[in-house]
Amino acid sequence: MSQDWLLGSAEDIAARIPDGAKLAIGVDNIGVAMETTRAMIRRGVRDLHLVCVPMAGLQADLLIGAGCVATLETSAITFGEYGVPYRFHDALKHGALKMMDATCPAIYAAMEAGRKDIPFVPLRGLLGSDLVVHRPDWKTIDNPFAKDDPILLLPAIRPDVALIHAPYADRDGNIFIGRRRDFALMAQAARNGALVTVEEVRGDVDLMASEETAAAALPAIYVEAAAIARRGAWPLGLDGSYDIDEAHFRRYGELARTADGFARYLDEFVHPRKQAAE
Amino acid sequence: MSQDWLLGSAEDIAARIPDGAKLAIGVDNIGVAMETTRAMIRRGVRDLHLVCVPMAGLQADLLIGAGCVATLETSAITFGEYGVPYRFHDALKHGALKMMDATCPAIYAAMEAGRKDIPFVPLRGLLGSDLVVHRPDWKTIDNPFAKDDPILLLPAIRPDVALIHAPYADRDGNIFIGRRRDFALMAQAARNGALVTVEEVRGDVDLMASEETAAAALPAIYVEAAAIARRGAWPLGLDGSYDIDEAHFRRYGELARTADGFARYLDEFVHPRKQAAE
Amino acid sequence: MSASRQELLIHTIAGLLKDCRSIAVGASSPIPGAGALLAKHRARQRMFVTILGSRRHNAMNSGGVELFDMAAQGRVDAFFLGGGQIDGQANINLVGAGGAYPQTAVRWPGSFGSAYLYYLVPNVILFREEHTRRVMVPKVDFVSAPGPRGDGVYRPGGPVGLLTDLCWFSFDKERRRFTLQTVHPGHGVEEVRDNTAFDFDTSPTVGPTPAPDVEALAAIRGPIARQIGEAYPRFVRQVFPDDA
Amino acid sequence: MSASRQELLIHTIAGLLKDCRSIAVGASSPIPGAGALLAKHRARQRMFVTILGSRRHNAMNSGGVELFDMAAQGRVDAFFLGGGQIDGQANINLVGAGGAYPQTAVRWPGSFGSAYLYYLVPNVILFREEHTRRVMVPKVDFVSAPGPRGDGVYRPGGPVGLLTDLCWFSFDKERRRFTLQTVHPGHGVEEVRDNTAFDFDTSPTVGPTPAPDVEALAAIRGPIARQIGEAYPRFVRQVFPDDA
């Protein structure tokens, strides 16, 4: 079985994300491709449209702070108990971001519509929220199947690519995702599928061979390419493998309070290769 | 942990399906609740609206032949290589069925809309098919997000109950379904969830305890009630447990060619209790 | 042994949830999570509790969308929402305050699932510990999710009330007003009034919020602290330093 | 050793599929399944083959809807459809014939996924072994799925041609007509004409359908027979009694 899907490193993964790409990313605790994120900043990607499924944290703040993001579509940006996303706030205040505030189920429903390649999907709730006022891409119609029943239509979201980090790939490029079904949704809705980093490739495993393990896989047909990145979610955690690096996350939060501090953070933790070359 | 979800037999499961219920059933090879189906015929259920997800076979033919079905919504009725569904054909010819011919993805999309409790969902394809002519419940509109783009809207399907047979329930009533995700869709879309028969209850298993097994479960919150029915899919098979009883299936096909033969089949294989009591 | 602030809230929440079949608790919500677990601990009926962030207390397996679909299906009886601002018509703001959106002076994380669940879950408990005029405002600057408005929008759900560090208000969906029902021990009606910038009614039977009895406290400090500690270890270390 | 009827069809299908990345094969389709497996066996590129009814050859894990969603996403390059009736404009009928629907004189199983996949899969191969005037009709009695019509309906997919026991027709979507391209060894153009009740064109280069060479035959009778036998044991016992 050819392993042409397996690239050498997170740098190779990052190289497949062009400027202007619409990129689906997941929540901080699910398995975030942080090493790929650093590689994207190193190569200087620009004008990304981030679709946060359904919200984001450190990964988004880093990309925003590094000037990689033009449009942010999300239900929330939060560090939870680990601090405040100052780079996000700073970019908002300076008008440096096109902000598309949403609500979690609207992002999911629009991604599901993208997975089906239908142009739009109706969704309950939302009417009367100021979110709708600021989303001219959403349309309110009268439900054609009932009387006096206004309902919101959301256009489908089809990202260009989904970016994920997962515990392992099997010999055929199927990715173990357990019950992180969000990864499957992201990969399926994305026109080019998922770009994946994994902790390891298990050449002795065929996830699709049994009912038990097949249900826990992201099938290889949705995987554009993968690469090994050990501790590739660091400083975030990977459920079942390693915990979040709390001290590092808090330190980020302190440094990123100012533009200067954020620049120092990038120098120390994102651009070490550049430093070494100087 | 209370096991109030666990009933005594397939008869108890059948007793929870009232006349006129809208019932979701699956394809013949997925895990069909045939013992429950026989119990439904024994108790004489009437006026069912069968929603076949996305098609059906022996189970539907039996229920139709026994006069239990008023409305049939399906993409196909087929016995595959095991014969011809004569009871279905006979009922159609006699005008005894309200027939709602569909296409597989339309049933899935409408069930997914039911799972989301949205009133309708658009779907590609279909326009120009005679299916649309005979489905006045479907509506063609102009896509409000584009020009000159007609698209079909399907009303959501919310069955009253989903009827399934599965390998086992765990101690908490979570059902092992492997990658049979259709069962999850059926149970979630159904207002009252799933009525389930299982080969066994594994009191030592907690499917939700690990990422690996959780992905293969139908969570208990979607399970209205369950009962043990050993070989409960017979004469159909259950993947990984037992094969289809080909000889029996063919014999059914021969007997069910005529109304008399079908009545003899019911006497021999569905109503043995009545016989024993006579 | 008297109940702490957090224990009183946990106990109050459990009482509000006692008739539910299914409860979901969002992120960063250890007190609602503990309240839901206490309700389950005491329930005679089968109760499903899903705590986002917990592996153990999770009735779901289909990804993040499942909570929302489940709510739409009618399978979530209770949920908790907060807000940087809450007003007297139960509008909530999780986005930002001061200045023109999106360049607000203050930015909060965002609306999360509020603009959906608030419409569909029959028993939404508004929960915000900080009870100040800064939070309890006459009118929110941004409506993440509106209170019930009688505007013809499909809405089987909505708020049943608002629980804070000071008190419990019920909410009347027809009159679109909060009513002060109980005030927590050590606090008074005037204190509530001084710290609330929106108008509200006061129940003729207003009284103290019932405190947990010895049995309830033992449950909170024992099994409930242990269970909530799986998702919220830091919370348990802070609130139950001697017990967990 | 010469190719059987089935082996010729398997070989022909494999040739049609050679540039695909992803092929799906529906129920009750052993010959298309074997053709897809042969294409994969010979492919230099990575090829995904999903055979409904096979556990081993299944690129999917999200239930029956996944095939259709995958097709909509552009991730299914080829699929097979048949029909109780097929007409010269590539309309197909899987529902019934004779009399008024639904009380037709003949009832077939139903439309399956045809009314969707026919629009979305770029290379639909119409496959029907029986080549008679009963099947190849001037106009179908019921349109399960229409041929391409230039009617403004979103349709990135459609038929590339029709393969039968007698021949291979290509289909021209603009002209909405079949063109006879090759006739299987042992059959002739006149025989095709006699057994086809719709009008079609004949290619100026019409010739015999290429038969599998020794290497291809060995693959079909060896690894392909073994692989397709997992989902279709009876087919393999009948067609490859000595090999499998």
Image (cartoon, coloured by chain):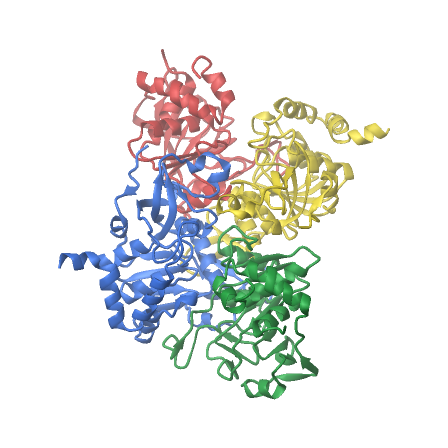
Chain colours: A blue, B yellow, C green, D red
Residue A166 at x, y percent in the picture? 38, 48
Specify the quadrant of the image occupied by residue B60. Answer: top right
Residue C49 at x, y percent in the picture? 59, 58
The vertical placement of D116 against D240, above or below, is below
> Furthest residue to the right?
B278
The vertical placement of C194 against D171, above or below, is below
Please say whether residue A45 is visible from this viewpoint: no
Q: Quadrant of the N terminus of chain C?
A: bottom right
Is C85 left or right of C224, judged from the image as shown? left
Please say whether residue B96 is visible from this viewpoint: yes
Rendered residue at 46%/57% (across/down): A108
Residue B168 at x, y percent in the picture? 61, 39
Rendered residue at 39%/17% (across/down): D187
The vertical placement of D141 against C224, above or below, is above
Specify the quadrant of the image occupied by residue D208. Answer: top left
Q: Quadrant of the C terminus of chain C?
A: bottom right
Residue closest to the eye, C74 or D101: C74
The vertical placement of C211 against B58, above or below, is below
Residue closest to the eye, C84 or A229: A229
Residue closest to the eye, A75 or C41: C41
Residue B63 at x, y percent in the picture? 69, 37
> Furthest residue to the left?
A278
Is B11 left or right of C174, judged from the image as shown? right
Question: How many marks can you see?
Answer: 0
Residue closest to the eye, C74 or A81: A81
